[in-house]
Image: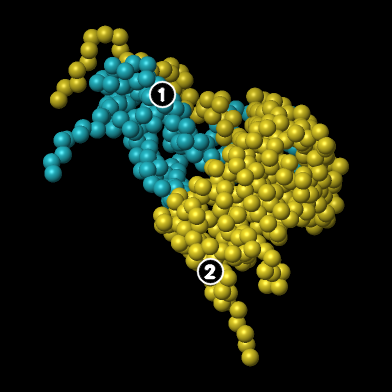
Chain colours: A cyan, B yellow
Amino acid sequence: MSMAAVETKKITLRTADNHEFEVEEAIAMEFSTIKTFFDENPDASEDTIPLPNVTSKCLSAIIEYCKSHLAFRARETSSSIDEQVRTYDEEFVKARDNESLKELILAANYLNIKALLDMLNQAVADRIKNKSVEYVRRFFGLENDYTPEEEAAIRAENEWAFEGVDPDDD
Amino acid sequence: MSIVTKQREPLRLPIKTEAELDKISNLPGHVIDQILSHLPIRDAVRTSVLSRKWRYKWATIPYLVFDNQCLNVSSQDQTFIKNKLVNIIDHVLLLHSGPLHKFKLSHRDLLGVTDIDRWILCLSRSSIKEFILEIWKGQRYKPPSCLFNCQNLIHLELFNCLLKPPLTFKGFKNLRSLDLQHITIIQNVFEHLISSCPLLERLTLMNFTGVTHLNIDAPNLQFFDIGGIFDDVSFQNTVHLSLVSIGLYVNIDDEDNDAEENSSKLLRFFANLPHIRRLEVQSYFLKYLAIGNVPSRLPNPCVDLNYLSIRIDFDDLEENIAAQCLLRSCPNLQELEMLVSFVYLLT
C-alpha cells in the first residue's frame, strides 16, 4: 500500500538571537499570538516569522513543552495521564533558576500560551512561598521605598502573616 | 535552501523597546496578579511590605482561601486560635477590594456561627462564584438566607451543614457543580434544589440526613457521586448523565425484601440513563439493585458503558443475578472491576 506523502505544514520562526526553528503547524498554533496572526493573514504562512522578544533557549524549551502536552492531550484522559502531566511539568520547572523562569514567563506571555503561563505562574508562586521579603523583592526586581518606620508599621498591622517566616537568607 | 523574503511590509508581531527588554526583572501586571492569586493568603498579604506600589496589590486578588495553613501559631488554646482567625478574616475582608470570585473557609478551629453568617453576608454582596465551607467540628451549621441570594454561584461545596433555604428561594440559576457532604436537608427541599438549578452538571452527595428517596431531575447532569443511606434512587431527564458512582452504606435486610416488591429496582435505575459511560456500584448498592424481579438483561443495553466497577458478595444469590444482568447489558464494556466481599464464619 503506498501512501502519498502528506506534508505536515511547517512554520519557520526566527528568534532574537537569529536562530531559525522549523515547527509543525500544530505546535505553532499553540502560540495564540501566532494563531491570531495567521487567522488575520492567511496568505502569510510561507514566510519566516520573527520573534524578537524570544531567545532560542526559551523557544526550544517552549516547543518541547507544547509538543509533549499535545501528545498528552491526544491520549484518553485518565488519572495516570494526569500524573504523567504533573511529573512532566515538575521536571520542566525544577532545574531552572529564577531568571530563566522569568524569561520563560515573558516568552509564554508574549506568545500567549495560556496553559504554559498558568503552570509557570504557579511554579513561581511555589518558589516564593515562605521566602523572606528580601528574596521576593529581588525576584520581582523591586526597590524598597518604605521608610523603616513605615515598614515596621505594616509588619505590625499584618503580624499574623509574618509569624514563622524564614529570616532573610539566600 | 534560501528562504524567500518578499520585498514588502515586514511581518510584524508586537515588539518591545530596548528599555523594556533590559528590565527582565519586571513582569507585566497581569502576570503578577496571576502569581499572587496562586499564593496562600499569608504570603499574599506579606507582599504588602515589598514596596509602596505593592501595598494593596494582594487585596485585589479575587480568591480568598482560609485554611489550616493561614495561621502559624504554636498555641494549643482553641479559643485563642479561633479569635485570631476571626480577626484575620475580618481584617482581610475589610481591606479586600474588587470582585471576589472564590472564597474557601476550612479551618479545624472554626466554630463561631455569627462570624460565618457575617462573612457570608459580605460575600453575597460581591458576586461570588465559588463558595466552599467546611465546618470541621460541632453541630451542623445553618447558612443564612443571604447565601441563597448568590445568583452568580457556579460551584458550591458545604461540609457539615444544615440546608434550609428561605421559602422565596428559586434555585441557583448558574450553578454547575454542587458538593454536599455530612449535611441535613429535608426531602422536598433537596428535590427543589436539584430541579431548580438548570445548569447543574456535577452533583456529589455524601452522608446525608433527611432524604430517603433520591429523585434526580437534572437535564444537564453529567457526574453523579453519592454515598449514604437511602431507600430509593431514580432519575428523570438525565440524558447527559455519563458518570455515576453510588454507595449504599447500610445492608438491606433480607426480610424487608418481601414478595410484594416485584418491580425491579435495577430496571427503574437504568430507565433514564441512556448514555451512561462509567458506573461504580459500591458498598451495598448491588443488593439494592437486586430487589424485585431482575430481568436476565436490560431491555435497552447500555451501549456507552465502557467502565463498570461492582462490589459483590458472591455468596448472595440475588447479587449474583443482578451482576449477571448488568454484565449481559453492556456490550461495549472495556474495563471491569469487581470488589469481592468476604464473610468468614469461624467455628
Residue found at the far top of this picture:
B8
The numbered disc on residue A91 is none
Q: CA distance from mark 1 to mark 2?
A: 59 Å
Instruction: Please say if B306 is above or below B249.
Output: above
The residue under label 2 is B321
Tell me the element at label 1: helix
Residue B94: image location, x then y, percent: 78, 31
The numbered disc on residue A33 is 1
Q: Quadrant of residue B237?
A: top right
Residue A65: image location, x then y, percent: 38, 39
Residue A96: image location, x then y, percent: 43, 42
User: What residue is at 83 percent from the left and 37 percent from the top?
Assistant: B167
Tell me the element at label 2: helix
Q: Dividing the image into 4 quarters, which one contains the N terminus of chain A?
A: top left
Instruction: Please say if B251 is above or below A130.
Output: below
Out of B256 and A60, give the one closest to the viewer: B256
A118 lies left or right of B5:
right
Q: Chain of mark 2?
A: B
Instruction: Please say if A4 is above or below A48.
Output: below
